[in-house]
Image: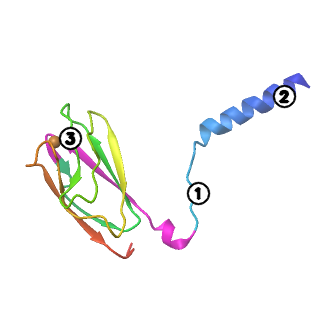
Amino acid sequence: MKRRFLLRRAAAAIAAAAFPLVPVWSGAAIAKRREHRVEIGDFEFSPAALEVSVGDTIIWVNHDITPHTATATDGSWDTGELANGAEARIAVTANTGSDYFCAFHPVMKALLAISKSATH
Ligand SMILES: [Cu+2]
């Protein structure tokens, strides 16, 4: 009895480790959502131009020792300060502004084109 209980707990622990929280999405439109990764390194955003759709997520990762931000030129969104190794994500909405820059180093700029309809 006791051994069976322990085995069950062990199985549950293994299952939890093997299947971490995976968001469950339903609907064809939602299934088209994509994630876009922007690497920050050597004071540059890469890719420097990105095309996304409403519903997508953009993730910025800072590989520089220096902190950076990704800040919308029109002020509609801001990752805030990203320390070395930190990442931030923005969900793209119809109100998400396009191009962005680093608030600490305004020469760091990138282009962001947003398709209002999910085409991919
Ligand atoms: Cu910067």
Residue ID for mark 3: 68
Along the line of sight, the residue nearer the viewer: 93 or 47: 93
Left or right position of 20 against 82? right
Q: Which residue type carries mark 3?
A: His
Q: Indicate the quadrant containing the C terminus: top left, top right, bottom left or bottom right.
A: bottom left
Q: Is mark 2 within 8 Å of ligand 1?
A: no
Is residue 120 positioned above or below 70 on the image?
below
Is residue 62 positioned above or below 100 on the image?
above
Q: Is 68 colored magenta in this rendering?
A: no
Query: Which labelled disc corresponds to residue 24?
Result: 1
**Magenta segment, which residues?**
27-44
- Residue 15, horizontal then vertical, whole percent: 67, 39
Mark 1 neighbour density, 10 Å: few (under 14) some (14–19) many (20 or more): few
Mark 3 and mark 1 lie on one chain; the one further toward the N terminus is: 1
Q: Quadrant of residue 20?
A: top right
Q: Which residue type carries mark 1?
A: Val
Q: CA distance from mark 2 to mark 1?
A: 29 Å
- Residue 46, horizontal then vertical, whole percent: 21, 51
- Residue 42, horizontal then vertical, whole percent: 14, 40
Q: CA distance from mark 3 to mark 2?
A: 50 Å
In this picture the colour scheme is rainbow
Query: Which labelled disc corresponds to residue 113?
Result: none
Query: Which labelled disc corresponds to residue 5?
Result: 2
Q: Is mark 3 within 8 Å of ligand 1?
A: yes
Mark 3 or 2, closer to the camera: 3
**What secondary structure is marked by label 3?**
loop
Label 2–label 1 contact, CB within 8 A: no
Q: How many marks?
A: 3
